[in-house]
Image: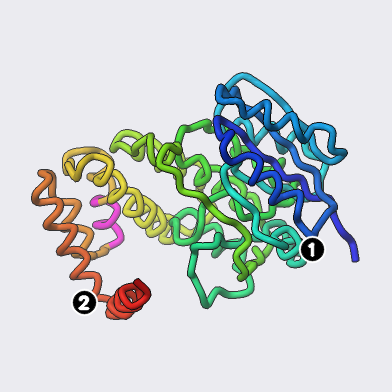
Amino acid sequence: MHKPLVSIVVPIYNTAEYIDECVQSILSQSYTNTEIILINDGSTDGSGEICQKYVNLPHVRYVEQENQGLTKVREKGVILSRGEWVMFVDSDDVLLQDSIKRLVQLSGDDCDIVIGRHLNNKNTGLPDYYSWEEYLYRIYSITTSISTWGKLYRKQLVMNSPHAFEYNLIRAQDLLTNIAIAKTNRKNVQICKEPVYYYRQRLNSTVHTILFSFDYCYNLCNIADSIMGESLTYRKRLNGSISQRLYYYPIILKGNNYQGNNKHPFVKNIIRRMNEARMLRLSDRLVLAASDRRTVKICLLSSKIIRRLEKPSLIHRDIKRIIKR
């Protein structure tokens, strides 16, 4: 059986507490035809000293540079990589046992992307694969994981994706990178149904310390639209863009202490697109119409109730969660 070389790119920035566990999880993989590329992006907490412990290993490379941001680190890792396939692993996360083996087993000439799931993702009933078109729609509409970690990419596909690392944003870089790669892809995307990745949620991570704003998401979603271009039918792009923006809107509200802004172009843009799609979605329209904190919170609660009336299966899911507690 052909065992292709897999390059594992690990961007590092001030995660000294977790690097050892991360690297050890890669070194202990049952699939051994790998190279590990550690890129220290200007850490100031001693992360570099920890990485020095691994530089003498034959399949580990270590690079230090001034801080350039996560997107540029990943781009550099791909350029430096020698493997047929590339993986990204955040330096505070962990690969689960046999992760690389499971992903590689699903790879082949008829596939350029293999996606896995993280340990806490309980999504079941997944198909064996997505068509390239369905995967592109799911990434664009954020109805599947938009993370770059937990996935196996053919290096040549990434190198052929011109916008994969063009936008060096501080949050949600993965959305833009994955849209660019999925847009270039023309093969079925294989799905590994076993968990392959442990995603650690830290209170001091970028996800928790840098909040989304209306302006930021307005810019982010417009960039996503520009990368997407006309790769799908207009109707799919319209529905996908609505789904994407509605995904970010509650996150904005939470970070903004539930202060809405129905006059902001981001909100107006969502409503305009919903009107064009003739989408009622009363639960969402209620929240979009509100601005003051008290009304927003009431509308969010009402939205949850309406969603459960529209989709009773959500009530069943809620009951299962309560029972597990």
| Residue sitting at the far top | 66
Q: Main SS type for the magenta part? A: helix
- 32 displayed left or right of 134: right
| Residue sitting at the far right | 1
Q: Which residue position is annotated with label 2?
A: 309
Give x and y (percent) for residue 17: 56, 37
Q: Which amino acid, mark 1? A: Gly
- 3 displayed left or right of 28: right
Mark 2 surroundings within 10 Å by alpha-carbon count, few (fewer than 14), some (14 through 19), many (20 or more): few
Evaluate if marks 1 and 2 touch, with contact meaning CB atoms under 8 Å apart: no
Which type of secondary structure does the marked residue at label 2 adopt? helix
Give x and y (percent) for residue 8: 72, 45
Of the 4 image quadrants, the one containing the C terminus is bottom left
Q: Is 58 above or below relative to 96?
A: above
Of the 4 image quadrants, the one containing the N terminus is bottom right
Which residue range is magenta in the image? 271-277
- 188 displayed left or right of 265: right
User: Which picture quadrant has residue 269?
Assistant: top left
Mark 1 surroundings within 10 Å by alpha-carbon count, few (fewer than 14), some (14 through 19), many (20 or more): some
Give x and y (percent) for residue 249: 29, 49
State the residue at coordinates (33%, 78%): 323
State the residue at coordinates (79%, 60%): 30
